[in-house]
Image (cartoon, rainbow, N blue to C red):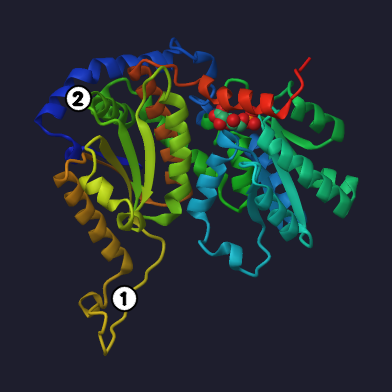
Amino acid sequence: MNTIKLELEKALDAETSEAMKAIAPEIENAVNTLYSGSGAGSENLGWINLPAEINHDFLTEIESSANNLRRRCRFVVVIGIGGSYLGAKAVIEALLDSFASYRKDNKTTVLFAGHNIGEDYLADLQEFLEDKEFGLINISKSGTTTEPAIAFRLLKQQLENKVGKGEAQRRIVAITDAKKGALRTLADNEGYKTFVIPDNIGGRYSVLTPVGLLPIAVAGFDIRVLVAGAQNMMQQCKNSSIDKNIAAQYAAIRNVMYRRGKKIELLANFNPKLHYFAEWWKQLFGESEGKDGKGIFPASVDFTTDLHSMGQWIQDGERTIFETVISVENVNNTLVIPDDKENLDMLNYLAGKRVDYVNKMAELGTQMAHVDGGVPNIRIVIPAVRENYLGAMIYFFETACAISGYTLGVNPFNQPGVEAYKKNMFKLLGKPESK
Ligand code: PA5
């Protein structure tokens, strides 16, 4: 059963349709390269069969660790950056009540740190946590990333001072490499509960490992349903026939667009809960494809919000963009626009209509305007923002990204470029050479 639909009609003119036919053999080749493990970076393909390999006992272990943290802590700070936080943040923000942080109930709330070097951010966080029951999930594959290391050092000290070393040990979970790295050594020395980030899964492909699953479970969401959604999508992504594989079709249209001068892809949503899903998507595609002087620039917008800021550029600016809209068929609530006697805002023509109906018309109107304005429009349609469809989208985008990267002619699993700023920063900071 298809949980996700891919609609390409509004991106296809006569020439693009021809180009899609022409690129099909390259795409099918890329699918075969990916699933046979014969391409560049094939040592990082642990994510490919992951949804099918996740078993009941593994999920039970994650759930029980999550329950332990939920019992002890009102707030759990997830410390990580890039692939070590964006997947969890994307899923949690998509599923969470938008005003959860203002509620006065006792549900455990997940906070994030270690994804910046903001002194004010960390100081605010420490002040906020001063009188709160909190715990930490420290996530770093390498164990040496500066941003999370600083945050962990500060928060670990704060927690130990507050509850004592013994209780702190019970409230800290480390997710890192099985054997190597500073965080592995620290966790073993301190006796923290640990989970492993498999060697053959890179950060941006790790959301279905404990990196994503533990924080998502702590936030109270159903990781079994999330994984089941990914499993379902996995079956069809393996199909080397482009007609039957929507990940391959998405990879094909992206490469066709790129070759026709569309160098920027805008991922748009009409549901603000998907904001961080786009942040995750940007890392996935940006780090995977932006190398060797090539790659579509992945950008994102939240509509209709950004129609009032970026709308002008999208409609009339340089014609180097195409748009991919994540369209949600059904919202989770019902809200009807009320009638108003005065009707000063002239809104009575919408009285009795659902807010989502207005949003859907905005979506359709935007599509028509952008296509008219020379912005090809791709739609990815999901039935609702729920765990199973998010799981399916995660696997869909991961696979599409790998196929797209191979078609572009890059290794989609490395990220040599991210070292450049670190080298300079370490030199400026006077970091001693590691022995
Ligand atoms: O995708 C990646 O590999 C990166 O974004 C990393 O996840 C990020 O730099 C964090 O690295 P680490 O988990 O080693 O701290």
Task: Please tell me in which quarter of the rendered image ligand 1 is found.
Answer: top right
Toward the viewer: 384 or 128?
A: 128
- Give the residue number, with chain letter if any, for mark 2: 20
Residue 21 picture location, percent across and down: 17, 22
Could you say whether the residue bearing mark 2 is in a helix, strand or loop? helix
Task: Kindly tell me whether mark 1's CB lies below 8 Å from ligand 1.
Answer: no
Q: Is residue 240 left or right of residue 140?
A: left
At 18% from the left and 51% from the top, the residue drawn is: 369
- Of callouts 1 and 2, which one flags the residue occurring earlier in the amino acid sequence? 2
Image-quadrant location for residue 334: bottom left
Residue 319 picture location, percent across and down: 21, 37
At 32% from the left and 51% from the top, the residue drawn is: 310
- Give the residue number, with chain letter if any, for mark 1: 337
Q: Give residue 26's mark.
A: none
Tag 1 and tag 2, C-beta contact below 8 Å: no
- The residue at the far front in this view is 428
